Image: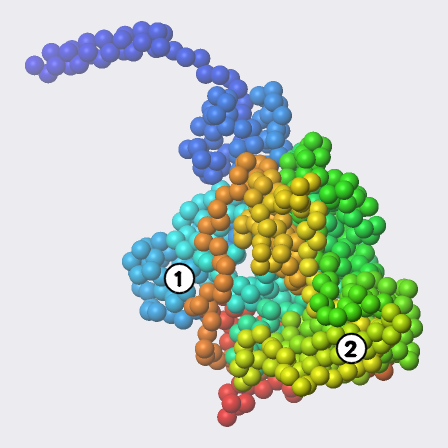
Amino acid sequence: MVTSSILVLFILGLTAAGILAAASKVLHVEEDPRIAAVEGCFPGANCGGCGYPGCSAAAGAIVKGDAAPEICVAGGPEIAENIAAIMGVEASFKEPKIASNICTGGSRANLLFDYEGVEDCRAEALLYGGEKTCGLGCIGMGSCVKVCGFDAIRLNDDGVPVVDMNACRSCGKCADVCPTGAIRISGMTMDLLHLNKIDDCLAPCMQKCPAQIDVRTYINQMKRGDLRGALLTMKERNPLPLAVGRLCPAPCETICRRNIADDGVAIHTLHRFVADWEMNSGSRIKLDCNPATGHKVAIIGAGPAGLSCAYFLRRIGHEPVIFEKRDEIGGMMKGIIPEYRLPSKVVNWEIQSILDLGVEVRTGVEFGRDITIKSLEDEGYEAVFIATGAWKVPALGVENDNAENVIDAVTFLEQIGRDITDLKGKKLVVVGETNTAMDVVRSAARLGCDVTSLIGCIQRKMSANKDEVKRASELGAELKFMASPTRILVEDGKVSGIEFCEVEYDDPKKATGIPKPVEGTEQVVNADFIVVATDRLIDTAPFMDEEGKPLFAMNKKTGGVNADDISLQTSVPNVFVGGEAYTGRNIIIQAVADGRRAARGIHHYVTEGAVPEAKNPQLRVIPESILKNMEVTYTIPRIKVPEITVEERRSTFKEEVTGSIIYEAARKEGSRCLRCGLTCYDAEAGAEYAQDSDVQKFSELKG
C-alpha cells in the first residue's frame, strides 16, 4: 500500500515536472539585461521612496519606460546619470528634497493626560488624538525614527525629531507614519513658495508678517551664533532684509506674545542685525538656484515687488527679465526714500545680491510705450508680472492747487539733497498723514526751513509709522492734527500761504467717521512751498488700450489692477500683478510678500498651465493662537537701539538715524523670544541671563 502510494506520487511529480519544463520553453521570456544593469546602479536600500516595491521593481519600470532615470530617492545625480547612460537618454535635473520637522515645542505644550500604551505616534493619535493640547505638533513617540532606513532622524532631549540633512534621502516614510503632519518632505521650490496653512505650526508673529518670515527660527539661529543660517531662513521669504530691516513698521511686534508679560521682542531690530552682518562682512552668502528651466517671465517694474518676484523665480530655475522705466533700479528705495532712512549703498548691495543670481534688467523701458503684453508674448515670455508701483500724488482739490511752488511729495523727495540743497529762511507746509509726508517733513527740517504739517486726523489714525511721526516732531516741525486745507493763497502766481480749517469726527470720542470741517475755524499759515503728500496713486494710463478701455479688470477700491487674492493672477491668465500696482499705497514688506506670491502663481502657470487653489491658507490670525494669559519665569528689558542726536540729524542728510547693535546685545534680545508654536511657548526663555542685574523673575515683578 505504501509502496503504491509512493509510486503514484512519483509519477505525478514526474508528470508535473515535464509539463513545467515544456511550459517554460513555450512561455519563457528573456529578461532585458538592462534591468540588472540599472538595478546595479541603485544603492540597494529598497526603501520604497520611489513608489515601487524595491529596487528591482524600480529598475524594471525604468527599462519599460514607466519611470525616469532619476527616480531613486536614495541616490544622487551621479546614480541618475549612470542609469541614463545605460538607457541612452539624458538625465533630468531632480530637485533634492529632505524631511523637516515643523514642531519645536517638545514638552512645552500642556499635557492632556499621561499616555501609557504602545510607543507609537499613530496609535496614540487614533486612540486619544495625541497627549498634548496642540493638535498639530509632534506627539514624540519616535515612530518616524523607527521607520527611517537611513538613520537620518533622532529624538532630541525634548522628544522632538531632529533630521540629519546629509543622511536624509527623502523616502517619505517618516512623513507617512506621522499622524499630525509635523514631519514633512520638502525641497527648495516648495520651501521658497510655501504659503502658510492653518495646519502649520505658526507663532503669532509669523501669522502677522505679510511675508510669512519664520521669525522664531531665525532668532534662534542668530542666538546660537548661526548667523549664516539665520540669514538663509530670512531669505526664504524676504530677498530684501536690509531694506525691510530699516523701513518695515513691524506689524509682527504688535502681536508678539511677549507683550502679554512685558514688552514684545524687538524683531525688527534683530532682522536688521542679521542682514547688516552679511553686508558688513563684505562677502555674500551663496544662494542656491535650480538649473534654468527655459521658462521666460517678464517683470514690469524694478521696485521691491518686482525684485522680489524675480528673486524667487530665478532661484527655482526660471528666467526673469525686469523692465524698468527709470534709469535706476530699486523703485522708491532708490532716490525717493531719504538716505538717513535707507542709504543708497545699502540698496545697491541688496540689489546686487539679486542680480548676481542671474536676473537680467533692462532700464529706460516704459510699459505701454516701448513694450506691451503682446510684444512680450511675441518675444517668448510666457508670463508677465506687473509691479509698476504707485507714483502719482493727487492734487489737493482746493483753489490754486496748481500754483507755482505747489509740489507733489515724490517730486520733492527726488529733488531734495540733489536739486534742492538749502531751504534756510523758507517756510514749507506739508499736507498729509502718510509716511511719505513725514519723510518730507524730516527732510525739509534738515535743510533749515520752518516746517508746518497739516494732518487731517488724530495721531493714532495716521497711516505713518509712529516712530516717523515722533522723529518729525523732534526736528522742530509743527504738527497740526485735525487740520485740513481749504485754499492756497497766491501772490504773483506763486504760493504765499495756505488757508486751513479744523475738522471733527462724527464721534469725537471714538474718532469714527470721516472728519468734517468745523465752520469758523479757518486759519492761515504763510508758506513759500506747499508739498502735497496726502496719498500715492497708481498711474493706470499704461493699462488702457487705444480706445481707453482697461486691459485688465481694475479694482475700484485700490485704483489698481484686480487679481486673485492668493495667486495674484489677473483677468488675463498669463498676467500677474503685485505691490502697490495691486494694493495701492502700502508698506515695503507687503510688496516683498506680493512678489513671492506672484512667483508661486507664475511658477504653476508656466509649468502646469494653471494655478492650483491653495489648500487651507492662513489668511488671518488663528484665534486659538491668541493667548489671554501666560506665565514667563524671567523678564528682560527690551533692547534700546542707539540713535544719533537730534542736533546731529539737523546737520546731516545721509547718516542713518538708527544705529547698529553688537552681537551680544542681539543675542540677549533674542533670548527674550519665547520660541512660540501655535499654542505653546518657552516659559524659561532668557534663563541664561538670570544672573544679570537687569533681569528679574516675573513672579517677583508681579508681586
Q: Quadrant of residue 82?
A: top right
Label 2 element class:
strand
- Looking at the image, which residue sits at the far bottom? 703
- Residue 228 relative to residue 263: left or right: right
* Residue under pointer 1: 135
Dots 2, 1 in contact, CB < 8 A: no
Q: Is residue 371 visible?
A: yes
Q: Quadrant of residue 173?
A: top left
Other-residue count near label 2 (Cα within 10 Å), few / some / many at <14 / 14–19 / ≥20: many
Q: How many marks?
A: 2
* Front disc: 2 or 1: 2
Q: What residue is rendered at 59% in x and 37% in y?
A: 606
Q: Position of residue 433 (x, y in %)?
A: 69, 73
> What is the quadrant of the N terminus in the image?
top left
- Circle 2: residue type: Ile
- Circle 1: residue type: Gly
Q: Position of residue 146 (x, y in %)?
A: 42, 50
| C-alpha distance separating marks 2 and 1 | 61 Å
Of labels 2 and 1, earlier in sequence is 1
Q: Position of residue 599 (x, y in %)?
A: 62, 47
Q: Is residue 308 visible?
A: no
* Residue under pointer 2: 498
- Residue 75 relative to residue 232: left or right: left
